Image: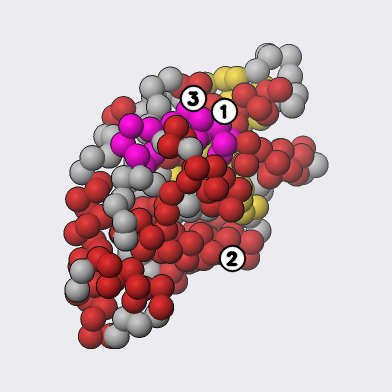
Amino acid sequence: MDLGKLALLSFGGGLTSAALAGAGLLLAEAVLTARRGFLPAETAPVQDGAVGDGSLPELRLALLGDAMAAGVGVMRSNDTVGRQVAQRLARAGYRVQLSTVAVAGSRTADLGPQVSRALLRSPNIAIVLVGAGDATHGSRLESVRGNLGDAVARMRAAHVPVVVGCCPDLGAAPCFPQPLRSVVGWRGMQVAAAEMSATELAGGLPVDLAAATGGIFRADRGTFSEDGFHPSPDGYRLWAEALLPSTLNAAQAHATL
């Protein structure tokens, strides 16, 4: 089965049970080939630290998730999504202490240890960016819902408001040739929907990054870094702006605790 047939069958629901294993292997091999050109984890800049005037109320912000939470794709700390969110919170009247526990390559199944590390630092709010790896590795949607729901529930049990940036629009990523791009994009939509429902059920605040920013990523190649998968400074800026309203709500919710 070639990728063109796989794309058509995936969208049309025509994959038989006998063909699923072969189709899954084909998709995995194609994705792996594309991933070989991705920027390595060690290129992510350090983004932890204080942002904002020292006289403002302190807000401890934890950032969990995958390579995109870690900042792969940019060279400067201030261009990462974490720093860009922190800068906007500082302008809203907070001194933000940003702490990143995200690990490149993580999927929802890897969030448990990150939650443990984050809670050791007593965050006031948390942002989770994860899902792209689940989409490209074919994680079961039931597992995505369960793993993310557990992570959000653990932080909510510790009275930490949680904002989850759900899987972005992978169908915009130029690193994937067509029709693979369409298949991966379709799978990303499934993962994002699972994340949205799991986050809401666990008491978190979901942000649909694909709906909020996917159109711009599709129209502007400059929103991607050189590997065509991770965001550029402009791409992370779009995500920061999409995350900000819910993050401000989370900050206000913390202030009322």
How many residues crowd mark 1 within 10 Å: few (<14), some (14–19), many (20+)?
Answer: many
Please give the residue where the numbered disc 2 appears in the rendered image.
197
x and y, in percent, of residue 210 in the image:
54, 52
Residue at horizontal 76%, vertical 39%? 252
Q: Quadrant of residue 87?
A: top right
In the rendered image of this protein, does residue 168 appear above or below residue 117?
Answer: below
Could you tell me the amino acid type at mark 3?
Asp
Foreground mark, 2 or 3? 3
x and y, in percent, of residue 129 in the image:
49, 46
Please give the residue where the numbered disc 1 appears in the rendered image.
84
User: Which label belongs to residue 79?
Assistant: 3
The residues tagged by marks 2 and 3 sit, at their Cα atoms, a distance apart of: 30 Å
The residues colored magenta run: 225-240
Asked if residue 14 can be seen in this view, the reply is yes
Q: What kind of element bears circle 1?
A: helix
Determine if the magenta segment contains residue 228. yes
Q: What kind of element bears circle 2?
A: helix
